[in-house]
Amino acid sequence: MTDISVLQEAAELTILYRDEHYIAIDKPSGLLVHRSFLDKHETQFAMQMLRDQIGQHVFPVHRLDRPTSGVLLFALSSEAARDINQLFIDGLIEKRYVALVRGFLNESIFVDKPLKEELDKIADKFAQQDKAPQQAQTHFHCLHQASLPIEIGKYPTVRYSLVECFPKTGRKHQIRRHLKHLSLPIIGDVNHGDNQHNQFFREHFKLRRLMLFASGLKFVHPYTQQPIIIKAPLGETMLGICQQLGWPNNEKDYYGDY
């Protein structure tokens, strides 16, 4: 888990994978992928920073929300971008996320719940406002659970789960919204989360970020036909929280079958 404040000190992005066609970084939480007129005051963007770091143009092939950290893949040519984009379109790239949520997920579950498009008041003011909900599917699997004898709201204890998330479609805020649908809001989610638990994590763990991590990408390379697995670490901050919740504090314990 890379935080943007750490990045500002290091001045370089962490490269997770590179070949002659593609490059993947560990995007920090809080860093925009590219320039946006909605954030005119921002001066740092993953695409421009990576371009300057490696000395060549890069082409984004997917996106991560600003508060989400983890694997962000770029192509090194427009042709490579076109070919990897087709894999995304065809559903041939497996995306794995890890989320810290309020509540217990007691078993694996597949959510097939269409989502109405979330429109931004400024960026989407000319977009069609009455679109039908779009197909959205996510598979969830619980990695760990914890219960703490702390009273928040009307409950004498608090429960948390660490959940693997495998989105099969790519709707805006899909994982966050599907977990909210399951009454398992992600810690640190301002728009779809639980403010009481967000505040608890700010006060108790000094945490001020969305606890959603793009932890892995898996696909067959479009040119070499070799299987590619790219992983991003959860990082010391998250591992420290895991340890306080009674979970393992070793990165390898959080990759499932990856």
Image (cartoon, rainbow, N blue to C red):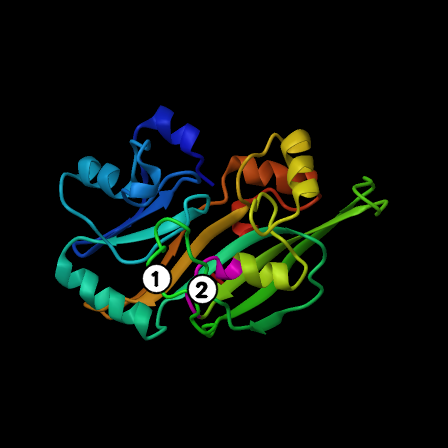
Residue range corresponding to the magenta coloring: 169-175
Say above or below: 81 vs 225.
Answer: above
| For marks 1 and 2 on the same chain, the one whose residue lies earlier in the sequence | 2
Q: Quadrant of residue 21?
A: bottom left
Say above or below: 90 vs 71.
Answer: below
Please give the label number shown on residue 127: 1
Q: Quadrant of residue 239?
A: top right
Q: Which of 106/209 is in front? A: 209
Q: Is residue 243 visible?
A: yes
- Give the residue number, with chain letter if any, for mark 2: 117
Which percent across, then down, holds residue 192? 58, 52
Q: Amino acid at mark 1?
A: Ala
- What is the C-alpha distance between the residues marked 1 and 2? 10 Å
Please indicate whether residue 221 sits to the left or right of residue 8 in the image. left
Which percent across, then down, holds residue 174? 49, 62
Q: Does the magenta run of residues contain 167?
A: no
Camera-near label (1 vs 2) is 1
Q: Amino acid at mark 2?
A: Glu
- CB contact under 8 Å: marks 1 and 2: yes
Q: Does the magenta run of residues contain 171?
A: yes
Secondary structure under tag 1 reads loop
